[in-house]
Image (cartoon, grey):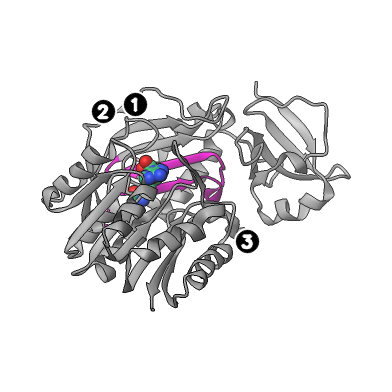
Amino acid sequence: MRQLVEVKLKSKFITDIKNGYPLLSKEAVETSGVTMDEGSLLRLVDPSGRYIGTAYYGLQNKGIGWVLAFKEQEKIDAKFFVKKISAAVARRKNLYEAEDTTAFRVFNGEGDGIGGLIIDFFDGFYMVSWYSEGIYSFRDDIYQALEEVVEARGLYEKLRFNTNGQYVEQDDYVSGEKGEFPLIVLENGMKYAVDLNDGAMTGIFLDQRNVRKALRDHYAKEKTVLNTFSYTGAFSVAAVLGGATKTTSVDVAKRSLPKTIEQFAVNEIDYEAQDIKVMDVFDYFRYADRHDLKFDVVVLDPPSFARTKKITFSTAKDYPKLLKDTLKITNQGGIIIASTNNASFNMKKFKSFIDKAFTESNTRYKILEEHQLPEDFTVPHNYPEFNYLKVVFIKVMN
Ligand code: SAH
C-alpha cells in the first residue's frame, strides 16, 4: 500500500499552492519528524489543518514533490493518469495532425499537471522521462493510462534520477515495436535523426522548434552562420535548408562530428561543404578573432553550466562575456541568436545581460524576436518561472 502522509504547510506558501504553484519545496513544509518515502502521497493541509491539496513525494533538485490534485476525494490511480494524459493529448491536436512535424512534447510535467513526468512523441514512438523515484513508483498505472489514451508504435523511457541526480544508463526499450535508430522525424519539413536508446539525449532538443523555423525562414538566406555549442547541428541543418551560404558548427564533444554529419546527410546536404569543428567554443572564439573570421548569423545556445579543463562557465554569470566574445566575430548588421535554458533567471534578467554586453562593447542593437517555450511545452498559468527557455534574436547595429 502506498503511504499517505499528512503534511502541514507554512502559511506563507499556502496562497501560491492554492493558485496552482505546483512545486513543493522543502521550506514550505512545517511538519517535521514524519518520514516520507519516494512515491508517498501527501495530504497537504494549512496551519489550521484544512485540506489544500494532494501531492506526491519525489526528490528532485528543484524540490521535494509536486501537487497533483485539489480535491480530497480524487484518487491518484490509473484513471487519474488517463484524465491528465488525455487532456494533454487533446491540447496537442494540431501537432498530431501536422503532416510536416512528427516530433513534439506530449506531456510537459507540471504544465500538464504531473511534475516529474515528461512524455515526448517521435513518429509514433513515445518516450517517457521519469525525474524521480517517486513518480517512477507510479510507472505501472501511468503506462496503463498512456496505452489507453494513445496508440503507440513502441515505448521507450529515460530514468533521470538516482542518488546524485545523474542519468541512469540502461536499455531504454519498454514495449511494443523496437525502433530502428536513427529514426528520422520531421520538424516543419526538416528531417532530424533521433535515437531513443542512446544515453540521456535523443539528438534533438524539441523546445527549439520555433527557433529553428525562424532561423530557416527569415535569417539564413545567403548568410554565413556560426552555430556554437552545436550538439548534433540541428540549427545548422535549419540554416542550410534556409539557404545559408555556409555553416560552421562548433562543439567540444567528439560525438558531435558524426552526429552532425548524420543530420546533414539525412537532409541530403553535402556535409563536406559545411564546417564542423570539434573544439571548445572559447578556443574557437580566439581562433576566429585571430583569423579575422566574421559571421552574419551566430547561434549561441550554451548549456547552463559547462566545465572544461580550462574554465568553468555558468550562463547566470558569464553570458555577457560570451556575448562580448561573439560580437567580435559578428558582422555589422548581423544577427546573434542568444539562447539559454537556465531556469534560475528570467527573460528580463537575460535581456539585462544582453544590454550589458552591448553597452560595454559600445555597440547598438535591436531586438527583432523573442521566443520562450513552444506551445507543446505547457507551463503552469500564473507561474512563468517554469518557462525556462529564453531566446532573443538580436540585430547588431554599429
Ligand atoms: N544548441 C544545441 C544544443 C546544445 S546542448 C541544439 O539546439 O541542438 C549543449 C552542447 O554544448 C553539448 O553538445 C556540449 O557538448 C556542448 N559544450 C559544452 N561545453 C562546451 C564548450 N566549452 N565548447 C563547445 N561545446 C561545449
Report the amino acid beneath label 1. Tyr
Counting other residues with Cα less than 10 Å from the Cα at mark 2, is it few (<14), some (14-19), or many (20 or more)?
Answer: some
**Mark 1 = which residue?**
173
Spot occupied by residue 149 in the image (x, y as percentages of width and height)? 41, 41
* Alpha carbon separation for disc pair 2 and 3: 40 Å
Q: Quadrant of ligand 1?
A: top left
* Visible residue check, residue 222: yes
Decide which of 154, 313 is in the foreground and name it.
313
Q: Check whether the beta carbons of the residues at disc 2 and disc 1 lie within 8 A of each other.
A: yes
Q: Residue under circle 2?
A: 178
- Magenta residue span: 98-124
Name the residue rendered at 30%, 57% in the picture: 290
Kindly identify the amino acid type of the residue bearing the numbered disc 2. Answer: Lys
| Residue under pointer 3 | 382
Q: Which quarter of the figure is the C terminus placed in?
A: bottom left
User: Quarter holding the N terminus?
Assistant: top right
Numbered disc 3: secondary structure: loop
Q: Residues within 10 Å of mark 3 (few under 14, many from 20)?
A: few
Mark pair 3, 1: CA separation: 37 Å
